[in-house]
Amino acid sequence: MTSCLRAITAILLVLWIGWFARSAEATDLKNTIRNLYGSQGILLEPTGLPFFAQESRFQASSLQGLDNLNTQLTSAIGLPSFSSSVTGFTFDMDRGIPVRTTESLGPLLTERATTLGARKLDMTLTYTRLNFTKLQGKDLDNLELVFLRDDANGNGIRDTSGPFSFESDIIRARLKVDLSQDIVAFIATYGFTSVWDVGLVVPFTHVRLVAKASAAILDQFGNPGGTTIGNLPIHRFGPNSTPPDASGGGEETGLGDIILRTKYNFLRNSGGLTPDLAFLFEVKLPTGDAKRLLGTGGTNLAGLLIASKTYGRWFTPHVNVGYEINTKDLEQNTIRYALGFDARLLSELSFDADVIGHQKPEGNGTGNHTVDLSLGVKWNPLNSLIFRANVQIPLDKDSGLRADFIPTVGVEYLF
Amino acid sequence: MSLLTTRTASLIFVACVVVGAIVHSSTPAEAAKIIVLKSADVDVYNEALEGFKGALQESAIVEYDMEGDLQKGKKFLARLKSGPRPDLILAVGIWALQAVVEEIQDIPVVFAMVLNPTTVIGQEARNITGASMNVPNEQQLALLKKVSPQARRIGIIYDPSQTGFLVKQAERIAKDQGLRLVTKAITSPKDSFAALDAMQDEIDALWILPDLTVLAPEWVQYMLLFSFRHKIPVLGLSENQARMGALLGLSFESGWDIGSQAAELANGILSGKSVEEVPFTTARKVRLTVNLKTAGKLGVHIPKEILDRAAVVIR
């Protein structure tokens, strides 16, 4: 019990550090792309007679395009999965003795139905690196936005011929976005009873978002410079316009969104083919500053039904199915599912493989359905000490904000 | 939810965990002080502890889980000796009993959930009693007799260092019931195959004892194969063995009940009885599993009375 209390004190300390780990002044990292060309969007060089004033003709489109990209990008940033741990003993009825579990050490990113055990405290520290490379299948370092011009003659269409064919000029902005997250997560799980766990995840996040954009004016045929009258371009950048090249962003570090969770294992060792079953309830609190991209800014509630069954004391397939409600943005409500197994390959080493999916039934089109493959190992060199390493690989890079792979390493100790 | 509110909620949550843990371990000063040493965190031990606590609600009980580590258990007990003396120690499981036997000589000890406790407790120990998981020999032999009335010769393979005391008891009981035990003593698991083969024409039934020397999975498989080949019923130790093919499996009913039995013994000691006046107990409630598939293959008729008693019938 003393070691448990010592460990709980450590949790309090981590929370205390998190409390004070805010920078004095919050920056608006979240709106980096939205504000790339300033708060008014792209304004061109004012032109005098005989032309109509053209400076604000791309403003609405540029604002909207940048805003959409900003939303796409930032709404897709979230916390990766964190699992609770399972370890311990089983009881050999014939021999009347406990047997140190020879089954797997448990999955890394998904859940097994079994719980930690009464009055056990598991503490885990993980480091996860997310270096995003694609958004909806497009390379983040080569994104392209096209801004369209206002209708000049009021006929409701963009003329492609005649005196108003300049309406079909476009501004093409090429963007290079460097977006990455480094997350150190402190995870604690405590077994209140042999079938009921409570836990929390306290993530500390370092996020880097730097965007560079270069805009060019093209005519409807793709010719640089846009439509001209004689040698005079109708649309152009100049000393009084928004500069065509822009950059912005920065880095932030701080407390992310804290997750509280509880798992109840309501069916266990029932024999036959019936799996162990558990229900997990999770609350993600908006403790991370959303403006600084450290959190999502909303409270999420998730319920997960978990089924697993151990075969031969070493192989445990598991299924997780659940629903997550985003109370701030219902479009982000997500069906979560995972299917996989964990297997003890050696007495101290287990392997875990999962397919992890997230489906947003009412999603905004970005990452409405993402599927990842997760592969990992856990190594148990000493009684209560476990090292873990995992890599998450997107199976469909055309959906959502994706990294090529997401490595996680961690260390876990059971008190 | 504001940032402040959510952070406050997080802190309250953790504070509740801390307070809960402290409250959980705090106890009234005037109650009998009982230290529980648990061998490992397994469901059946936790059940036993619940059974124990249920019957001793007035006592101040502090638990320690030695997590399967004998040295950890011994270190805990060594520290215990230097602090305030508890009124009683409850050792749950055989590892906890081993640690207690080595470290504690002058504090009353009650054990629970231990199979064959005499293999751990020396003759000289005067401070230890408890509730074993062993099923009474009388019940096992009576069951065999009822299921297979024609069986007169019961085969047992055992390691004298593990279950010699059980065999001695069983021989006396068998004699009273008109049965004869055919016993083969072995000292190594590898001797068990030859010992069983040598019994081929000498026995009418086989009784598996809770003897670690003869409980290797391949040996249990061999006994069950022997049972089918020679149409000899086997009385096993558990539902698991009955599912593997033993005709019958007889085990203690629940950890909770063993824990309650231990609490009754502890109550006696806390009321002033000397430990030596309180003998070990065996499981007073048992759980019977009958494998009717095996019965069919062996040509054994299981009386309705037995089927009605069975907690599990495998059809």
Image (spheres, rainbow, N blue to C red):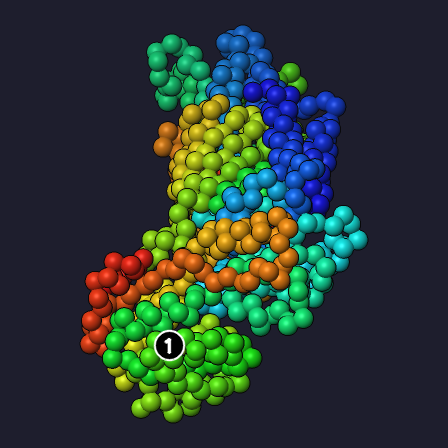
Q: Amino acid at mark 1?
A: Asp
- In the rendered view, does B85 fall on the left or right side of B91? right
Q: Please state the chain letter of the residue tagged with numbered disc 1 in the rendered image.
A: B
* Label 1 Cα neighbours within 10 Å, binned few <14 / some 14-19 / many ≥20: few
Q: Position of residue B244 (x, y in %)?
A: 34, 70
- In the rendered view, does A367 fall on the left or right side of A206? left
Q: Nearer the viewer, residue B238 or A341?
A: B238
- For the question of whether residue A210 can be seen, the reply is no
How many numbered marks appear?
1
> Residue A2, located in which quarter of the rendered image?
top right
Q: Nearer the viewer, residue A316 or A270?
A: A270
Tell me the residue that label 1 is attached to: B176
Residue beneath the point at 52% across and 59% down = B131
- In the rendered view, does A189 fall on the left or right side of A159? right
As drawn, A89 above or below A208:
below
> Residue A291, located in which quarter of the rendered image?
top right
Q: Position of residue A218 (x, y in %)?
A: 49, 28
State the SS at label 1. helix
- In the rendered view, does B86 fall on the left or right side of A175? right
Q: Position of residue B266 (x, y in %)?
A: 58, 52
Q: Nearer the viewer, residue B258 or B238?
A: B258
Q: Nearer the viewer, residue B130 or B234?
A: B130
Question: Residue furthest toward the right?
Answer: B82
As drawn, B141 above or below A77:
below
Q: Position of residue A233 (x, y in %)?
A: 53, 21
Residue beneath the point at 56% across and 40% down = B57
- For the question of whether residue B164 can be seen, the reply is yes
Residue beneath the point at 53% across and 37% down = A261
